[in-house]
Image (cartoon, grey):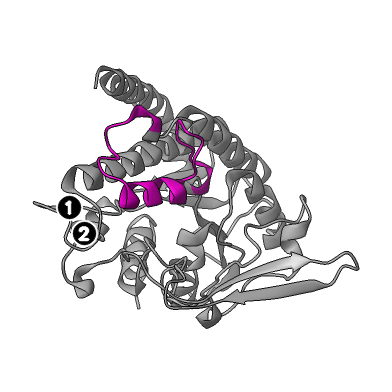
Amino acid sequence: MTVMFRAAVAVACTLAAICALSATAQASSTDSMPLVIQRVVTLGDSYSSGSGIHRNASSYDDHGPPAHSFGRSTRLGSSACQRELDETPGPRVAEQLDAESVFVACAGAVIREIPAQVRAAGISGDGDGTLITMTIGGNDLRTERNENWPDALLRCITTANCDRPEQNRMANFHEIRRDLTRIYVEIGDQYPGVMVRALAYPRLMQSDRWCEGVLGISRNEADFIDEQVDLLNREIEIATSIARVRTGADIRYVSVIDEFDNHGACRFWQRDRYVNDAVFGDSLRRSKLEDGTIREYWTNGPINVSTASFHPSSRGYDAYLDALQGSLAINVTG
């Protein structure tokens, strides 16, 4: 608890210092904000691609270029991007503004793959008239055991009291902040006229007295999981603030706490959840043969865990849309 308190104090001091430095940069970026958004570019991971809208991978609109994931310079994320091209926030805002929608987000994306996504987006000039929306950082999380986020969630579901061992806590927040800052600064330096909205991750569980909606998760474990999400979001917020100060570009963090409030996976009724609990459905993975042929492998069955698990539902993406709209200093209707 002492370690967590010290970390929270350090983060609060960092944010206070950044906010004091960034007032002028914020005013400048707002003054230069384009009146018309001509294109909306969706980058990032599964929380941007639309994972969670469908239980089956076969139901998504697109899975990205077949060979993208087999080259380091072209990799956009996992081999199956799970893109939903019309129900996610970026395309919906583009439709409302009569703007072009450019969709590059890919499930499984990590921070180091954002430069390839930016190149694939083909942003022209200095980025004037372009809005970039993204979620990124969740797939980079690692615990003291070096487990990734999905494995950490699985451990909580299948073992008791996962909130107690220190080895289950995320161990690389500072590295994530550093890497996110570098990526945001690169975007701001290359495209000083761009608008970037870095969307937060929702608190997944949001227990009340207990966690009725997720089998195997206690109230304390649900609170622990949500705490890790909050800590990640704080690093995203700090990184965007640093990048805004360094570049002067309109790079901003977008909280989704209010939009997802009391709608986590712990809710008893499915209709009240903006985040799915465990979901089962088909899945896709691609491989590359020696002759360069790309082969697709589909897996299905009654116990095949879908990647829609613990991702936003359709109503969750509605909540994301509300948060994105609220972050824009223009009138978005429709």
- Magenta region: 139-167
Q: Nearer the viewer, residue 238 or 208?
A: 208
Q: Quadrant of the N terminus?
A: top left
Sequence-wise, which precedes: disc 1 or disc 2?
A: 1
The reply to whether callout 1 and callout 2 are in contact (CB within 8 Å) is yes
Q: CA distance from mark 1 to mark 2?
A: 5 Å
**Crowd class of label 1 (few under 14; some 14 to 19; many from 20; radius 10 Å):** many
Residue at horizontal 25%, vertical 59%? 260
Q: Quadrant of the C terminus?
A: bottom left
Residue at horizontal 36%, vertical 65%? 312
Residue 235 visible, this angle: yes
- Tell me, for residue 207, which label it has, or none: 1
Image side of residue 2 versus residue 312, left or right: left
Q: Is residue 321 above or below residue 113?
A: below
Circle 2: residue type: Cys
Q: Is residue 208 above or below residue 147?
A: below
Under tag 1, what secondary structure? loop
Residue 200 visible, this angle: no
Question: Where's residue 121, x and y in %?
Answer: 67, 61
Question: Where's residue 216, x and y in %?
Answer: 25, 55
Q: Is residue 284 above or below residue 69?
A: below
Image side of residue 130 versus residue 87, left or right: right
In the picture as drawn, the residue positioned furthest to the right comes out as 291
Circle 1: residue type: Ser
Give the labeled residue for mark 2.
266
Residue at horizontal 17%, vertical 58%? 262
Under tag 2, what secondary structure? loop
Q: Is residue 75 above or below residue 305?
A: above
